[in-house]
Amino acid sequence: MQTLDTNCVLRWLVRDDPSATVRMDALVGAGRPLRVPDVAVLESVYVLQTHYGFSREEVARAIRLVLGQAVFQLDRTLWAGVMDDYVRYPKLSVTDIFLVVDAAHRGDVPVVTFDRKLISQMGAVAP
């Protein structure tokens, strides 16, 4: 299985480079599994929001497009939860949300933090 980096995910989503779009469409269309690491999703969220100016709702829709493609191998349940909370908690970063959702997904809760927003909004606890 091949692993995609953030640039590949972004080129497939944003479609702003015709040559890269064609190549990514061919790769996705071939139907072979393509691993999308969590870090590539996190970076994609960050770039879509900061560089492309996507709203949180638009970012979540874009990531859900990735989740909807069978060839992309990633934890769909985890990322669906992250995107739900990413829209629900606009004052929290996607990395903080990922941390809490991933911990819950693994049964490693509560998250221990000094971050007051995580404590008040997502049930984390102070040490």
Image: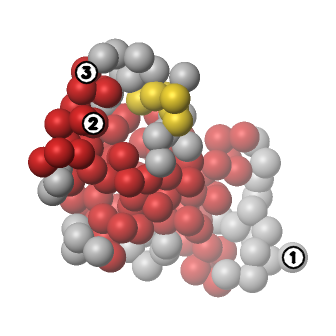
Question: Based on the displayed image, in which of its 4 quarters is residue 95 positioned?
Answer: bottom right
The numbered mark at residue 29 is 3
Q: Kindly give the residue lying farthest to the front in the view shown.
A: 19
Q: Position of residue 33 (x, y in %)?
A: 45, 21
Under circle 1, the secondary element is: loop
Please provide percent x and percent y for residue 89: 42, 69
The residue tagged with tag 3: helix, strand or loop?
Answer: helix
Quarter of the N terminus within the rendering: top right
- Reading the chain from its start, which is encountered first: label 1 or label 3? 3
Can you identify the residue that label 1 sits on? Answer: 127
Residue 61 visible from this viewpoint: no
In the visual, does 36 lie left or right of 7? Answer: right
- Horizontal side, residue 17 vs residue 107: left or right: left
- State the SS at label 2: helix
Pick whichever of labels 2 and 3 is earlier in the sequence: 2
Q: Residues within 10 Å of mark 1 (few under 14, many from 20)?
A: few
The amino acid marked with disc number 3 is: Gly
Indicate the amino acid at tag 2.
Answer: Met
Residue at the right extreme of this rendering: 127
Q: Which disc is residue 24 wearing? A: 2
Numbered disc in front, either 2 or 1: 2
